[in-house]
Image (spheres, rainbow, N blue to C red):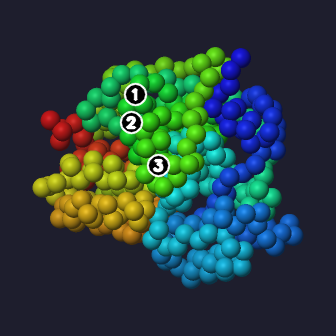
Amino acid sequence: MGLTMSEKILSAHAGRQLRAGEFALVSVDLAYVQDGTGPLTVRQLARMGFDRLHDPGRAVVFIDHASPSPRQELSNDHAFLRDFCAKTGARLSEIGSGISHQVATEDYACPGMVIVGADSHTCTNGAVGAFATGMGSTDVAAAMALGKTWMRVPETFKIVVGGALPAGVYSKDLMLHIIGLLGADGAAYKALELVGDTIRSLGLDARLTMSNMAVECGAKVGLIPTDDLTRQFIESAGRGGGFVEVVPDADAEYERVIEIDAAALKPTLAAPHFVDNTVTVDEAAGVKVHQVFIGTSTNGRLEDLRIAAGILSGRRVARGTRLIVTPASRRVYLSALAEGLVQTFVEAGGVVTGPGCGACVGVHEGVLADGEVCAATQNRNFRGRMGNPNASIYLVSPALAAATAIEGRIADPRTYLE
């Protein structure tokens, strides 16, 4: 019997063949934290008696959640993390550099790697064929100190997606559909393998959206097989020597196989207050929206900004509705500037903030008021996610976000693509 992608990657890092359900000690290629989880990681390192890192070049600290800091206590945390990097040699990704998962993909991730991060959306890097997963701060501290971590090899769900996505339907709609199908814990501690001609047709940015949200149905990792597109990306990033082919064996064993017809999908949203509370735009259209947020590690990439700007070009944001756009990284921001996308957003009445997580985590740059509704391209809509438990969040694609900003109500993006 052949091996799944997870079994292959973890076997290579354990030095022996592994099967789903087995426990093993595996080597770690990259470990990272962000400013929300990093202070605890650093303190746990000290408690465990470690004063040096296994390989400082493979440990990264990202200041992205409160970037720049809006409060004194967060500024102190940032100073604490900067001091840690100066003392240990860990890499520091400063304010304005971008979101950890986006920058990790741009600068570090390669197929076949094992990547652990003290953030649940570390699974984003599965889009380039890396076994990337979120862990607690203490586990990541141990990985930074020892260069290894323990792992239970997950069983795998094979998600086969075929057919062309209809106009106005994107990878965000597809992933929300999958989450609605499986449920918020329907793939708990499973690996998702996202395959099929629809997945192969997606650009890298769209693939990253898929892998990013794998954790929203409980999955440990969301893996996409490598192909020529993956190779081209790794080579263009200057890491051509790091490309290896990572694909499942034809006779790999799966716990579950799910087939989806992409052509049958419609623009899809997650209604408050759960990611698996999915509805189509036909069911949600007309809901008054006070704020639209385009960004995050889910949909703050260049392709996302292009899609939104294409709809907003020559149009204005509705009176009574705010539009906030936050590029996922400095590289994305510069590309958006060069292409005129930032000008499009500003001319439409939007606000473009510096790269980072922005309004998603609810500490600055877009905290909602009581009773307000936000249409956001982020990955979670739990009560209080954007800083106010008395507000509501709909999760949407960049296209649906742009259409909604124009109308001030949940709107169908297909109207603007005809």
Q: Which label sits in the foreground, 3 or 1? A: 3
22 lies left or right of 289? right
Q: Position of residue 302 (x, y in %)?
A: 34, 53
Q: Give yes or no for contact between labels 3 and 1 (Cβ–Cβ under 8 Å).
A: no
Q: What element carries label 2?
A: loop
Which residue is depicted at the point 66% across and 70% down? 90
Which residue is depicted at the point 51% across and 49% down? 240
Residue 198 image label = 1
Residue 235 image label = 3
Q: Give yes or no for contact between labels 1 and 2 (Cβ–Cβ under 8 Å).
A: yes
Q: How far apart are the two marked residues, 1 and 2, measured between alpha carbons?
A: 7 Å
Q: Residue furthest left?
A: 314
Residue 202 image label = 2
Q: Is mark 3 on a helix, strand or loop?
A: helix
Which residue is depicted at the point 20% across and 48% down? 311
144 lies left or right of 118? right
* Circle 2: residue type: Leu
Q: Position of residue 364 (x, y in %)?
A: 45, 70
Quarter of the N terminus within the rendering? top right
* Circle 3: residue type: Glu
* Circle 1: residue type: Thr
From what the image shows, is residue 357 above or below residue 77?
Answer: above
Q: What element carries label 1?
A: helix
Q: Which of 243 and 96 is in front in this view?
A: 243
